[in-house]
Image (spheres, rainbow, N blue to C red):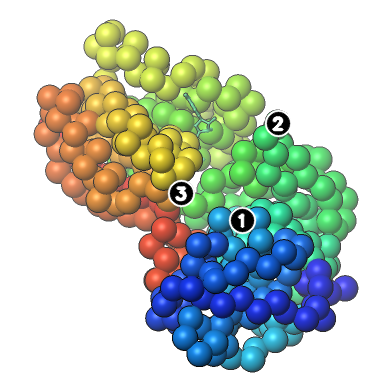
Amino acid sequence: MSLLRSPNQKPVKLQLRRDLVRSVKRGHAWIYADALRKLPQTGRGVPAILLDNRGGRDIGGGYYDPQGSIALRVCTTQRGEALDDAWAADRMQRAISLRHRLFDENTTGYRLFNGEGDGLPGLVCDRYADAAVLQLDGEAARNFWHAPGIAAWLADCLELPIVYERLRGQSGPRGRVLFGPSPDHPVHFLEHGVQFTADLINGQKTGFYLDQRENRHRMQNYAAGKQVLNVFGYTGGFSVYAGVGGAARVTTVDSARLALDAAAAHWTLNGLDAERHTVVCADAFEFLSEAKKDGRTWDTVILDPPSFAPSSESLQKALRAYKKLIAAGASVTAEDGILATGSCSSHVSMENFMAACQDGVGEARRQATTLGIYSQPADHPAPLAMPEFRYLKFIILRVN
Ligand code: SAH
């Protein structure tokens, strides 16, 4: 079975209007529609060759989407390289070999393919022990990559009994089985020896927020003997690490009831005392403002909200929301406590986010020192030339 939907299709030729040759050669994989001379009418996701803006020299290849704002995803910058099964298999092998260098048997949940960051534009795959979940980014990616073929290849190469595909749906989770049985039960996996499960069918994203693994691990060091508050806790990732790190008590807040049930289960799955963990189903902003009113504080506060900026237009609004959240978090952080906060929005730069931290802590009439500035882990690589692909920010502060 092929890894691509139309491996033998003759590529369309697209010519640059703007001089983006250097950017393409440096590894920027997105060409926006307004940077192309003409937008020929074709199907979405057809193979394409990119020609430079001057003499029409071939500078790379990729797949084309006449309807997308990203008109071309560049897959190769080697002149004449065919986008065929051998090419795709080589890119996937390279991605897998990186993960083999990164992880041992104590970490069995990680991102196997991170799209552009692995030279596989639009193709994401997360691995949870013996199960994999594919996610293709948009209609063009779904027409270029052949999901059932990739699933069969993965099942064979990594001896995986289950490969599932998550589809981005507006109205709740959608997906389909690509290989093996349906993953009807949550799948068990490890992160740094800590035990979790992921619900591949109904969970958020592909079931778990794998991108925060190293930040969760870092926060484990700030937990011993402490009162910890984990806001936007989902299935208890940060909470369980804090518990394993010896926290005196952990409170997990989220608005998703099902996620909190999983958080409670993950806590006991790791042999931790259920008495030391409280889950609260509430809106994060309301919970924090009530806690402030009641004069409650925690030694360590973790804020890991969903993206507040789904588009670049919503940036200012998002920055105000981050500031408000960080102010609320700082207000319930004990004297000399730790406040850790993240942003997963690609439209918010590290600089903007640091400024929101400054403004938020200031608004709470507190001061802080920066203990660490972090981003996404190595199994979520980003092309150096695409800073917008390095979406995750995570700041650890000491608040006095
Ligand atoms: N820290 C988690 C991931 C958090 S994802 C981990 O390590 O796994 C963001 C979470 O915020 C989701 O679980 C979502 O249910 C929750 N959420 C979104 N809006 C919320 C709100 N207004 N109040 C509380 N929780 C919210």
Q: Amino acid at mark 2?
A: Ser
Q: Position of residue 346 (x, y in %)?
A: 42, 50
> x and y percent of residue 75 in the render?
60, 75
- CA gap, disc 2 to disc 3? 26 Å
| Neighbour tally class for label 3: few under 14, some 14-19, many 20 plus, Cα within 10 Å | many
Q: Measured from the top left, where is residue 355 in percent x and y?
A: 21, 42
Q: Residue at x 82, y 81 (%)?
A: 8
Q: Which mark is residue 212?
A: 3
Residue for badge 1: 68
Q: Residue at x 34, y 11 (%)?
A: 290
Look at 51% across and 75% down and name the residue there: 16
Mark 2 sits on what residue? 171
CB atoms of marks 1 and 3 within 8 Å: no
**Image mark for residue 22:** none
376 vs 226, left or right, is: right
User: Which-is-in-front pick, marks 1 and 3?
Assistant: 1
Say how many tags the image has. Answer: 3
Q: Amino acid at mark 1?
A: Gly
**Residue 175: image x %, image y %?**
77, 44
State which tag comes first along the sequence, 2 or 3: 2
Q: Amino acid at mark 3?
A: Gln
Closer to viewer: mark 2 or mark 3: 2
